[in-house]
Image (cartoon, rainbow, N blue to C red):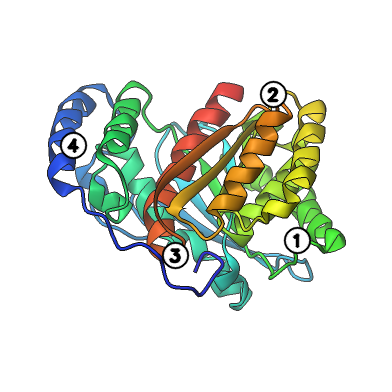
């Protein structure tokens, strides 16, 4: 689960009737504008680690993160190069063996299926596990008509069950990402090499660690995001100092905090965003629908993460 074993506080919200009209309208616009080099909706109908991506698994013996799963787009010209996103899972997967934990995003959070769906819109309410407001669904589908999903190489390293207060352990993991994982991604996969085309994100524990790593090594990233990050409102000023330092190191880095109405950490994430605002740290803040649980990761979490980084990294790269 994305960092907690508590039960969701809100029941599922269904918006099927409104979403159907939105989807039908967006389908007509979408069919006329998607690039022919990208997969068709019919060829990507099956969920799982197939269709729009292929799965690659790497070992890093002796490293703080001994296993990484990667999703690589299956479309594009032979010499195509894609931006890179490092995606960190939650505490539930941190407590699994590394080979299982590394599959948190691709398999357990259905990121491979989300990749398939954003590559062949329109999206439906079902793609979000029912957790989407009709207005947001329409807005995302309209965005995909004007700017179709271009694709990302997504690296999903195993994240140990780190404590945010253990600065040395967090720094060690950050060095693994920037000095070991990313160089190999750029060497062996169809990945763009520049920092401006590289993002980092995660959910719950992974969201907090992604925020720490991304802000502390801002010159290595073009975009830093956090989904339902496991923050404490009492630490808002400390996070703000990190964000201010990141802005000085890399004024162009994009930063986003995303929470949901059923997120245990909602108030802390909002407090951190407000602290950023007071310090004039430019960033995106979103509050969407959904619980802090696997259904969120499989729906809004995966889709929102892919779409935001696709846009942010294209703009900077």
Alpha carbon separation for disc pair 1 and 3: 20 Å
The answer to whether residue 191 of the structure is visible from this angle is no
Alpha carbon separation for disc pair 1 and 4: 41 Å
Mark 3 or 2: the one toward you: 3
Earlier in the chain: of badge 1 and badge 4, it is: 4
Secondary structure, mark 1, is loop
Residue at label 1? 164
Alpha carbon separation for disc pair 3 and 4: 26 Å
Mark 1 or 4: the one toward you: 1
23 vs 54, nearest the viewer? 23
Q: x and y percent of residue 99 in the render?
A: 58, 73
Alpha carbon separation for disc pair 3 and 2: 32 Å
Q: x and y percent of residue 142 in the render?
A: 29, 26
Residue at label 2? 252
For the C terminus, the image quarter is top right
Residue 259 shown left or right of residue 95 in the figure? left
Residue 24, compared with residue 85, is above or below; it is above
The answer to whether residue 236 of the structure is visible from this angle is yes
Give the numbered dot on residue 276.
none
Earlier in the chain: of badge 3 and badge 2, it is: 2
Earlier in the chain: of badge 2 and badge 1, it is: 1
Residue at label 4? 23
148 vs 307, nearest the viewer? 307
Q: Residue furthest right?
A: 168
Rendered residue at 30%/56% (across/down): 129
Q: x and y percent of residue 229 in the render?
A: 60, 54
Mark 3 or 4: the one toward you: 3
Alpha carbon separation for disc pair 2 and 4: 34 Å
Residue at label 3? 293
């Amino acid at each position: 689960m994305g960092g907690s074993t508590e039960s969701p506080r809100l029941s599922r919200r269904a918006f099927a009737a409104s979403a159907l009209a939105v989807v039908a309208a967006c389908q007509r616009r979408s069919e006329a504008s998607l690039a022919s080099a990208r997969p068709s909706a019919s060829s990507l109908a099956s969920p799982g680690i197939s269709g729009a991506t292929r799965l690659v698994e790497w070992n890093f013996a002796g490293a703080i993160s001994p296993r990484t799963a990667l999703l690589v787009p299956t479309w594009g010209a032979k010499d195509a190069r894609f931006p890179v996103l490092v995606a960190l899972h939650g505490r539930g997967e941190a407590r699994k063996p590394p080979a299982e934990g590394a599959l948190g995003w691709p398999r357990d959070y259905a990121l491979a299926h989300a990749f398939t769906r954003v590559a062949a819109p329109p999206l439906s309410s079902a793609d979000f596990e029912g957790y989407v407001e009709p207005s947001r669904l329409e807005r995302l589908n309209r965005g995909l008509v004007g700017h179709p999903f271009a694709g990302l190489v997504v690296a999903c390293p195993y994240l140990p069950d780190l404590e945010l207060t253990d600065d040395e352990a967090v720094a060690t993991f950050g060095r693994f990402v920037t000095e070991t994982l990313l160089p190999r991604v750029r060497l062996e996969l169809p990945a763009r090499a520049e920092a401006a085309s590289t993002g980092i994100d995660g959910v719950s524990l992974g969201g907090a660690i992604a925020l720490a790593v991304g802000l502390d090594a801002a010159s290595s990233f073009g975009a830093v995001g956090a989904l339902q990050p496991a923050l404490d409102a009492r630490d808002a000023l400390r996070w703000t100092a990190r964000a201010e330092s990141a802005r000085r190191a890399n004024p162009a880095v994009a930063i986003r905090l995303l929470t949901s109405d059923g997120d245990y950490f909602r108030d802390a994430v909002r407090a951190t965003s407000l602290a950023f605002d007071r310090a004039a740290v430019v960033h995106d803040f979103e509050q969407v629908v959904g619980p802090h649980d696997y259904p969120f990761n499989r729906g809004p979490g995966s889709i929102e993460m892919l779409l935001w980084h696709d846009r942010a990294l294209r703009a900077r790269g």
